[in-house]
Image (spheres, rainbow, N blue to C red):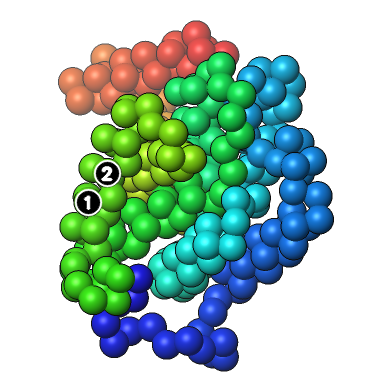
Amino acid sequence: MSYYGYRTFSFGPGGITKAVKYLLLANVGIFFLELLWGAELIYLFGLTPALVKKGFIWQIFTYMFLHGGVFHILFNMFMLWMFGCDIERSWGTKEFLRYYFITGVGAGLFTFFLSFNSHIPTIGASGAIFGILVAFAMMFPDRPIYLYFLFPIKAKYLVLFFAAIEFLASFRHTSDGIGHFAHLGGMVIGYIYIKRDWRWSSFFRLSRYLGYLRKLRYKHRMKAINKKREREQRLLERVDQILDKINQVGYDNLSKEEKKTLEEASQLLSQQSETK
């Protein structure tokens, strides 16, 4: 696949991004190890639901670094490079890696729960790759992608096309050797992740916003407390003046307003004594 007039095969600035490069190197390096110890690696690190139930829990993560052949790894790594670089540039390296592994592990969990008793191993980064394809389509929905380098199709329609194929294939119980549950799982987890905005940046924005609200609430509370203290201080000053007047002319010579002020001060003092 390729999209028109956008990507060039460049490994300099603006070319391959950091996380994509490391993922490419890791997958290719492990593939060479598979050429030497393929069966053993797939048994230990491929996702076999029956083994996961027995305690091979790491397989839900490690399966995405194994591949079933040259075409399998070439296709996945090409898709990773083609669509992953733009997402990493938009989100940053850490957020991109977080999304990649969440969709990959989510795809593994899909496979585990939907083929609970299977003894057939699932391998490949396709779950995470399909998650990346979903992210790309949601971020750049109208960008044209050339299917098989011939037919232009917008990213959003390509994802819908793939989703329909994977959904139908997942429940046909075919023996084509393709992990359709993993593909579908990666797409579903990716869609939910982006729709719910589970990115770290969103959590940071939310925490900053909550912190701002707490600070604002504290300021308002302190402002109200200060106003209350000012009113109390003015009341006490007025009471002192009235008490001086009582000493001079007696209580009966106070005005109604002055007597009311003394009552308010008395109520205030009783309230304060009750709260202590």
Q: Position of residue 214 (x, y in %)?
A: 44, 42
Q: Residue furthest top?
A: 274
The answer to the question of whether label 1 and label 2 lie on touching residues, with beta carbons closer than 8 A, is yes
Q: Which residue is mark 2?
A: 165
Figure quadrant of the C terminus? top right
Q: Position of residue 18 (x, y in %)?
A: 61, 73
Q: CA distance from mark 1 to mark 2?
A: 6 Å
Would residue 160 appear left or right of 1 to someone viewing this image? left
Which residue type carries mark 2?
A: Ile
Q: Residue at x 48, y 69 (%)?
A: 78
Figure quadrant of the N terminus? bottom left
In the image, residue 44 above or below residue 202: above
Nearest the eye: 140 or 243? 140
Q: Residue furthest front?
A: 175
Rendered image quadrant of residue 19? bottom right
Label 1 secondary element: helix
Label 2 secondary element: helix
Question: Which numbered dot is residue 188?
Answer: none
Nearest the eye: 56 or 272? 56
Q: Residue at x 54, y 36 (%)?
A: 108
Q: Residue at x 61, y 24 (%)?
A: 119
Would residue 23 appear left or right of 208 to someone viewing this image? right
- Residue 268 can be seen, yes or no: yes
Nearest the eye: 276 or 63? 63
What is the crowding at mark 1: few (fewer than 14 residues within 10 Å), some, or many (at least 20)?
A: few
Rendered image quadrant of residue 249? top left
Q: Position of residue 134 (x, y in %)?
A: 34, 54
Q: Which residue is mark 1?
A: 161
Q: Residue at x 26, y 35 (%)?
A: 168
Q: Position of residue 6 (x, y in %)?
A: 33, 84
